[in-house]
Image (spheres, rainbow, N blue to C red):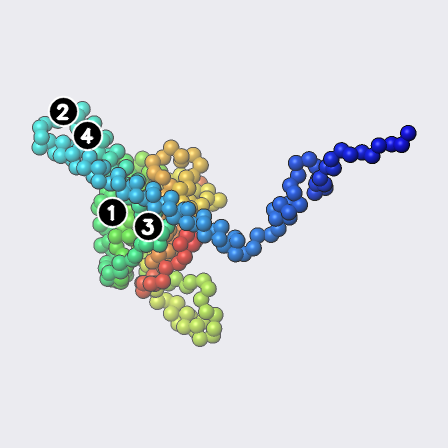
């Protein structure tokens, strides 16, 4: 008897792979290299999302400033005892409340500064000023905090420093960030030194023409920057973290429970870069830390790209 032809429906051919493999067109699309235009588009989308997120968080932080300022104002009013006397325990509680409010206010200010630096909207205000007076004022504001912690803070004015144009409030912000870290991590009985001096800063990448080289040799002893240093007798930082500590939200291993968001050094780095300066640390475990930064005597008006290191 003749055989009956098989009339079962044909099974569509796959791309030659196992069950569930991608169709050939999808597989080809997935394996195709991403074009430069596509990569640039995706990068811009990520940046846009980041900007929107940063703006939203900055807006929330800004909205917290007013009620927090009112709360701190009432605490100060109660501490003044103008509304009635306080007993010893009440004074202690009010002191703790005031300290907590001040810390929260600092966190909010750090985040707002970070957001402005991220969006590139921060502008420098260069005014002819005295660096000695600027640093002395910061030390005066921090002296009580250091005394409470049992730390010695030393600053000696340098007569060799001349007046030059710089953004004093932002320099004081950088110094405050460095002093806060020194105060936070230096054990009781330790010492912190603040020092400033003229410095000859030979930037990398300068023109290597013969004329340029001659000019640099002739001006070797002529300062073109100011070097500011904050040194302490704290536990020190391992060399592998000397660059990372200036990253956004970075916390050293073992210091996760310390106060702060890990933005102080990152903000300092960005502020100094916006002034055409730079910051670095010299440290070894058990030998303390020495943070130094340079700012040019002549302001550099062009800012580096956002997030550059």
Is residue 288 something that shows in the picture?
A: no
> Considering only order in the chain, which callout, 4 or 1, is on the residue closer to the N terminus?
4
Mark 1 secondary-structure assignment: helix
Q: Nearer the viewer, mark 2 or mark 1?
A: 2
- Pinpoint residue 16: horizontal percent, then vertical percent: 72, 41
Q: Residue at x 47, y 74 (%)?
A: 210
- Pinpoint residue 299: horizontal percent, then vertical percent: 32, 63
Q: Which of marks 4 and 3 is in front?
A: 3
**Which dot marks residue 225?**
none
- 85 or 155: nearer the eye? 85
> Considering only order in the chain, which callout, 4 or 2, is on the residue closer to the N terminus?
2
Residue pointed to by mark 3: 116
Q: Check the image and report above or below for 301 versus 86.
A: below
- Pinpoint residue 234: horizontal percent, then vertical percent: 37, 40
Number of marks: 4
What's the distance in space between the residues labelled 1 and 4, CA to CA? 26 Å
> Considering only order in the chain, which callout, 3 or 4, is on the residue closer to the N terminus?
4
What's the distance in space between the residues labelled 2 and 4, CA to CA? 11 Å
Q: Nearer the viewer, mark 2 or mark 3?
A: 3
Residue pointed to by mark 4: 94
Q: Residue at x 23, y 37 (%)?
A: 68
> Considering only order in the chain, which callout, 1 or 2, is on the residue closer to the N terminus?
2
What's the distance in space between the residues labelled 3 and 1, CA to CA? 26 Å
Residue pointed to by mark 1: 139
Q: Nearer the viewer, mark 1 or mark 4?
A: 4
**Which dot marks residue 87?**
2
What's the distance in space between the residues labelled 2 and 3, CA to CA? 43 Å
Q: Which residue is drawn at 26% across and 39% down?
A: 64
Residue occupying the far bottom of the picture: 211
Mark 1 packing: few (<14 Cα in 10 Å), some, or many (20+)?
Answer: many
Mark 4 secondary-structure assignment: helix
Judge from the rendering whether residue 243 lies leftward or rightward of residue 160; answer left or right. right
């Amino acid at each position: 008897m003749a055989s009956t032809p098989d009339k079962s429906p044909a099974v569509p051919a796959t791309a030659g792979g196992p069950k569930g493999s991608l169709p050939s067109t999808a597989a080809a699309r997935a394996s195709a290299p991403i074009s430069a235009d596509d990569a640039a588009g995706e990068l811009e989308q990520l940046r846009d999302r980041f900007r929107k997120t940063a703006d939203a968080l900055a807006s929330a932080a800004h909205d917290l400033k007013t009620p927090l300022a009112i709360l701190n104002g009432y605490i100060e009013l109660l501490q003044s005892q103008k509304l009635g006397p306080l007993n010893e325990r009440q004074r202690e509680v009010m002191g703790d409340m005031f300290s907590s409010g001040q810390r929260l206010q600092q966190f909010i200010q750090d985040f707002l500064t970070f957001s402005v630096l991220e969006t590139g909207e921060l502008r420098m205000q260069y005014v002819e000023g005295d660096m000695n007076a600027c640093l002395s004022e910061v030390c005066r504001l921090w002296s009580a905090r250091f005394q409470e912690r049992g730390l010695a803070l030393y600053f000696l004015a340098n007569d060799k420093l001349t007046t030059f144009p710089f953004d004093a409030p932002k320099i004081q912000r950088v110094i405050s960030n460095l002093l806060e870290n020194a105060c936070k991590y230096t054990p009781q009985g330790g010492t912190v030194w603040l020092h400033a001096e003229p410095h000859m800063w030979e930037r990398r990448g300068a023109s290597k023409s013969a004329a340029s080289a001659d000019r640099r040799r002739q001006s070797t002893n002529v300062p073109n920057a100011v070097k500011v240093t904050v040194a302490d007798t704290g536990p020190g930082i391992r060399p592998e973290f000397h660059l990372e500590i200036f990253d956004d939200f970075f916390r050293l291993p073992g210091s996760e429970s310390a106060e702060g968001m890990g933005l102080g050094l990152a903000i300092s780095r960005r502020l100094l870069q916006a002034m055409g300066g730079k910051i670095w640390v010299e440290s070894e475990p058990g030998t303390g830390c020495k943070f130094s930064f340079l700012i040019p005597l002549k302001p550099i008006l062009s800012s580096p790209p956002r997030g550059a290191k």
